[in-house]
Structures are given as structure tokens and as C-alpha cells.
Image (cartoon, rainbow, N blue to C red):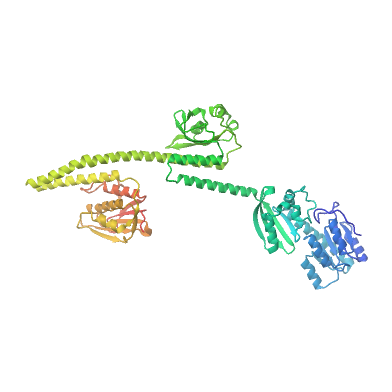
Amino acid sequence: MDTPVTTSNRHGDGGTDGRLRILYVDRDSDDVSTVREGLRGDADEFTVTVCETASAALAALDSASYDCVVSEYRLPDRDGVELLRAVRDQSLDLPFLLFTDDGDESVARNAISAGVTDYVAKTPLSEQTELLRQRITSAVARYREEADILDRMTDAFFALDENWEFTYANERGRRVIGRAMEVDGDTTDLLGCNIWEAIPSLRGTEFSKQYRQAMAQQEPTSFEAYYDPLSTWFEVSVYPSSTGISVYFRDITERRKHEEEIRGRERTLREIYRVISRKDLELEGKVDRLLEIGQDVLGTETAALSHIDGDVYVFEIVRDRTGTIEAGDTAPLDATNCERAVVEEQTLVLADIAEDRPELTDRAGYTEMGISCYLGTPVVVDGSVYGTFCFYDTEPRDSFSEWEVTLVELMGNWVSYEQERERREQELTRERNRLEEFASVVSHDLRNPLNVAFGRLTLIDEAYDGDPEHVEALRRSLERMDELIDDVLALARGGHKVIDASDASLDDIITAAWDTVESSDATLERVDTDTQVTGDQTRLQQLFENLFRNSVEHSADPVTVRVGTLSDGRGFYVADDGPGIPEGERDGVFERGYTTSDNGTGFGLAIVSEVVEAHGARITVSESEDGGTRFDVIGIQVD
């Protein structure tokens, strides 16, 4: 009755005739005959192979493929539960039905524990064969559905028993295992093969370590590892059980490659930041380093910053691995690819000049220098194209990536900004030099004759008994001229940046400034000023002096000046109870020459504004609580 047939890759793949293949194990010939006839039925859906013993059944399973096993409990060599356990050692999911009247609740419990698919009573046999038929059909349908789900899984999957032998692999798993096998990659007889023998290259790898550890510790684990024979990164999850391990894995090579690209881009951006933030490098040195970075990322032979001088293309800063181009070399602009970037005022991307822009192949850059690929972006300074920031090579490329184009544009934009900033600084330096020259003239050519006039006035006052009113009027005029000279010098030499910033006592600065105010009628009040202020102490004192004088000189009555700090250390304020400043005039109080006092120079608040701006702060003017004027300086740190 036992009829061995050739095995397939796995149990339950279905017969070629479409009928379900049933292995029925029972020694009672009468029962076998009844069951065989009952299962065949009118539709002839089943092919039934009968074995009388458990040993014969296991041999049949080793030599043929079946969709379901149906077994009596009492067998000559072992019972049905023991047979079930042996079958489960070979296949975790092959449907197995126990068809018997023998046994009790403990038999059923043991069968369930061993992984039985169903438990069907035998009596009355003629009626129960139809139920058995239904239960077999249902069990096989579920089994095939589960198998289809496994095969459709995105992840590759395989299962190993405790002897490291394959018990299952879905289609994706078979494909990967076949590629890893060092013989012919044929997975037809994979089931029952030892993984270390089928794939010797796994020994000693991270995969071997993790599989063995999961099996030994009975703890699930997940890891990522590189499998060198396949040049592939895998993400692996391992789930152990007492009978083996289940392994899910997927190819993550592209993801790892993308992650490495992201890390490489981050490294490039950090290096760019380190270069542009260096204080010890001039602009030329920074640009040279940026060209080197871009050259390494793009892999081009040549990188250059150029500027355009009429119809001439001038190589300003160059990195050329071929040694044919040097800084200072020139070429006709219309002979270069850069001319297109300049005229079109946009980034020019040519991975293969002959293919992308064949009209440029008649230029000397292509015909004489052999430039076959080009990536360059215009450098724009004050609205006009200064030149180009470009990279090129004599070998064409498949493409320039979006990241490479963005990187070149980013560096080119920074060069544009720095060129503008440097040009403005040069202009400011020239202006500052002119102001210094003017200050020297004022200091020498005006101060000297003014000092002479003061001296002569003293002599006149001492030698002659003239009109004291006229002498005093002349003295006030000379003193006003002296104040004007001091204010003009302060404006000329103040500068727009704080050079000597440090922490100082706010109270000390206020005291020193108040001591310079010539008014015995004025009163100073302080609110929370026993603190530190960060800034240029000399210029901050000048700021307070001018604000104090502004309050005193613009009030006909004795004035009270209040100084306090703003909340959260944001700055400080100076307020008074004087006549105040009309709302319509507050926007113009910081302009040079503005004054409402007969004795004012019109420069005091302009100097205050410059000191505030030099500290990177701002100043506002409003009405004080007492109806006078309040100035708020916001942005100077007070701790």
C-alpha cells in the first residue's frame, strides 16, 4: 500500500492532476477501505496513500509530497501523537488530522500541544468520513493560503530546526539563498539541508554569530550586516523557538548607500562651514579651499573662480590637477563655456558638452582644452555678474546629481556674498580714512586757532576793564565751537563696530557719565543698576553722557533723570520728567544736526545712535511716565 514518489521542494504544493494528496496512516484494513472510498467521493478530489505504521508514514513523507496527513492514534510502532511530533520536526505547518476514537482528554491535550491541525472522532465511521473530508479540505485551504501569504511577503524568510536544517523558505528567501550557495544555487532540495553546509561562507560572519546566539539564548534579535559574497547589506530579524529559528531579512543596500550619501553630504557641509568661519584665512584662501572641496566631491580635474574683464576671461583662483591652468591666465570670454553662464546669468550644467550643447563644441575650450563636462554658476556682485565659480573635466559624465548642482550653487552664492561684503568693507575703509583725515584737520587746523582765541580772551579779560557781558558772550561762542569740534571728532572716529567689548559695572559707567554733566539742579535716580553690562565701556559712557546732557539742556526747570534696566537683561532705559519730545518729531531726533536747544550742537543723539548700532542693538524714544522723554536701549546684555 505504501507508494513512495519523488519529493518536491516542500509539502503541500498540490498534485499535477489538481487532486489533494492524502497520506492516511491506519492498520485496520476495514477502516482504511471505508475511509479511502469516502474520501474519493463522486468528485474524485483526493489521492490517498495508505501506510500501516508510523515508520512507513515518515518514509513516505521523505520520498513524496503530500497535502495532508490523517492518522489513527493507535499504531503498531508508536502512537499518533508521537508520529505528529516526528512530522512536525520535518514540517511545522503540514496539515495533520488525528482521526480516532481511542484516547482520552490527555491524548487530545498532547495532540494540541504537539501542533495537531484537527481532531476528528471516528465513530460512526460511515458518517464521519464526510466530516473528515470537510475538515481536510478546510485545513489544506488554510495551509495553502498561509503559504501564499509567506511567499508574497516583502521580506525574504526561512526557517531552521534545532539541527540548523532548512524546514521552510519562501520564494524571496529561496532566491537569496540560491545566490549565496556556492555550488549551483539550485534550491530544489533545500529542505533538510544544513545551512552551514549549504552556505559555508556564512561561517564566522555576523549572521552566524547572531543566529547561534538567538538559538542559545532563546531571545529574538534584529541586526544589520554586510554579506561580502553578495556585496549586499541585509536587515535581519531572528525569532527563536524550542524547535529552531525563523529568519526574516531584506536587502537594504540601497538604503545604506543613501544613508552614506547623506552622511557624506553632512561632512561636506560641515567642512564648508569650518572653512568659511575661519578667522585666520583671507577670502582668497577660503575660496581656494572651497574649490578643493568641490573638486573632491565632483571628481573634476579643474576648479576655478574667474572674473570677467570686458571680453576677457581671467582665471583668478585655480586648482588644476593637470597643471595647464594657473591663476592670472586669461582667455577670450567667447572661447569659454563660462560665457554662457555669464550671459544667461544662471547655473550651467553640462555633463556631456557634445550631447547636451553641441553648439559649444566649436569653442576653444572644447577643441583645444578638451573640456567635455562643465558645471559652473555665476558670481554676482552688486547686481552685476562678476565672474563664475566653476568645475570642469576632459571626460564626459553620465550626469551631475541634484546635490552636486546645489553644492556648487551654495558655494558660488557664498562667494558672491563675500565679494560684496569685501567690496563694502573696502569702501567703508576708504570712507573711514577720509573721515580720519578730516578729523585730523579739525583737530589741528581748528583746535589750534581756537586755543589761541581762548588765550587771547583771557588776556583781554585780565588786562582791560571792558564790558563783561561781551566777554562772556565771546567765551560762550568759543566754548560752543569747542563742543562742536568734540562731537564732530566723536562721529568721525566712532566707527560702526565695537572693538573692545567686555563686562563692566553699569553703576560705575553711569556715575562716570553723570559726573561730566554740569548741572547742580539735576537729580539722578537709579533702578536695579547694580549689575554688569557687556560692551565697550568708553563708548557706553559717552552714550550716557549725551543722554544725560540731552535731558538737562532741554529742560528749563530742575530735571530728574532715571536710569534702570529692562526685564530679562535685554538692555536699559534713561527717562526724565522734562518737557518731552513731540510725537511727530521723535523719528528725527537721531539725525545729525537735530536740536531744539539754543546751546545744542545737534550731534549728541546722533552719537548715541551710532554707539547703539555699533553694539548691534537698537534705541527707541517715547514718553516717560512723568510726561518727559524715555530712551530704551534694547539688545545690550545686562546681567
| Above or below, 472 relative to 69 | above
| Above or below, 376 relative to 48 | above
Viewed as shown, does residue 360 lie left or right of 30?
A: left
- State the residue at coordinates (58%, 41%): 401
Closest to the observer, 179 or 255: 179
- State the residue at coordinates (21%, 39%): 445
- State the residue at coordinates (26%, 52%): 545
Image coordinates for residue 139, horizontal then vertical, percent: 80, 61
Closest to the observer, 290 or 614: 290
| Above or below, 24 relative to 603 | below
Image coordinates for residue 335, horizontal then vertical, percent: 51, 28
Q: Quadrant of the C terminus?
A: bottom left
Name the quadrant containing residue 381. Answer: top left
| Above or below, 522 relative to 319 | below
| Residue 346 visible from this viewpoint | no
| Residue 78 visible from this viewpoint | yes
Looking at this rendering, what residue extends furthest in the left direction? 465
Image coordinates for residue 435, horizontal then vertical, percent: 29, 40
The count of marks equals 0
Viewed as shown, does residue 605 lie left or right of 34?
A: left
Image coordinates for residue 631, horizontal then vertical, percent: 31, 54
Q: Quadrant of the N terminus?
A: bottom right
